[in-house]
Image: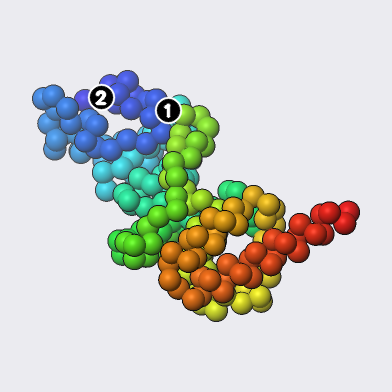
C-alpha cells in the first residue's frame, strides 16, 4: 500500500483504525510497517494502538475531540466538565476532554489533545445520547443533568453549596430538572439527591433573577 491509496481509503474519515486497511489480500505486517513509517514522517497521527488520523495537509476532516474520545475508549461517553462546557453550563474552556467508562481510569496525551477517562460502575453508564457535532461527526455525550451528576459523583465534597458555587453554573434553563431528579432518585445515592436539591434551588434563583431584570 502506498500513501495515495491510504488517502483514497481513509481520506474522508476524521479517524481510522488499522482494520479498515486489512480488507482483501492486504498483508497485515506490511500495513503496520507502512503506518509506522508515515507516523514517523509526520503524515499520520497515532492516537492509540490501531487508531490513526491523517495529519495536515492531508487531513480533509479535522476530528472533533469528542469523536476522538469515543474512539479512544469504546463504550465510553463524554461527560463532566467537558460536556458541561459544551452545553454552556460552565464558563470555563476545558483543555482536557473528560469521559467516563466502566474500564480502568486512563489519561492519554495525543497530538490532537489530552483525554481523561474516569471509572464509573456499569449501572451508572446511562444518561447519554449520540449528538451531532457538525461536519458529519457524532459522539456520545452525557445529557446536561447526567454530566453534572457524573462530576458530582466523581468529586469529593461536591454536594455542598460551596462546591457548586465554585463551578459557576450558568444557563441552568438548559437543564432538564425533571431528568435531574429522576437520575438522582434512580441512583439511590443520598449524595446525588442532596446535590440535585441544591442545583434546583440554584436554577430557581437564577430564573427569579432573570425575571427581575
The disc label shown at residue 2, or none? 2
Q: Which residue sits at x=13%, y=38%?
A: 29
Coordinates of residue 12 in the picture (x, y in percent): 39, 25
Towards the viewer: 18 or 165: 165
Secondary structure beneath dot 1 equals loop
**Would residue 109 be seen by someone viewing this image from the given angle?**
no
Q: How is the image coloured?
A: rainbow
The disc label shown at residue 58, or none? 1
Q: Which residue sits at x=42%, y=28%?
A: 58
The disc label shown at residue 76, or none? none
The N terminus lies in quadrant = top left
Coordinates of residue 207 in the picture (x, y in percent): 76, 57
Q: Which residue sits at x=34%, y=62%?
A: 123
The C terminus lies in quadrant = bottom right
**Would residue 130 be seen by someone viewing this image from the given angle?**
yes
Towards the viewer: 144 or 14: 144
Which label's residue is closer to the chain start, 2 or 1?
A: 2
Amino acid at each position: 500500500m502506498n500513501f495515495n491509496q491510504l488517502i483514497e481509503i481513509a481520506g474522508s474519515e476524521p479517524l481510522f483504525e488499522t482494520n479498515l486497511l486489512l480488507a482483501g489480500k492486504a498483508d497485515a505486517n506490511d500495513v503496520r510497517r507502512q503506518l509506522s513509517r508515515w507516523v514517523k514522517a509526520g503524515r499520520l497521527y497515532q492516537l492509540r494502538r490501531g487508531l490513526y488520523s491523517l495529519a495536515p495537509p492531508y487531513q480533509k476532516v479535522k476530528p472533533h475531540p469528542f469523536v476522538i474520545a469515543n474512539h479512544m475508549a469504546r463504550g465510553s461517553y463524554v461527560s463532566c466538565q467537558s460536556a458541561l462546557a459544551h452545553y454552556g453550563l460552565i464558563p470555563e474552556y476545558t483543555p482536557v476532554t473528560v469521559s467516563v467508562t466502566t474500564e480502568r481510569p486512563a489519561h492519554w496525551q495525543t497530538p490532537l489533545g489530552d483525554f481523561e477517562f474516569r471509572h464509573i460502575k456499569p449501572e451508572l453508564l446511562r444518561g447519554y445520547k449520540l449528538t451531532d457535532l457538525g461536519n458529519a461527526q457524532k459522539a456520545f455525550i452525557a445529557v446536561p443533568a447526567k454530566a453534572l451528576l457524573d462530576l458530582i459523583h466523581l468529586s469529593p465534597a461536591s454536594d455542598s453549596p460551596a462546591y457548586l458555587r465554585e463551578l459557576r453554573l450558568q444557563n441552568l434553563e438548559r437543564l432538564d430538572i425533571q431528568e435531574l431528579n429522576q437520575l438522582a432518585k434512580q441512583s439511590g445515592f443520598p449524595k446525588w439527591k442532596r446535590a440535585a436539591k441544591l442545583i434546583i434551588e440554584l436554577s430557581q434563583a437564577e430564573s427569579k433573577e432573570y425575571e427581575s431584570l
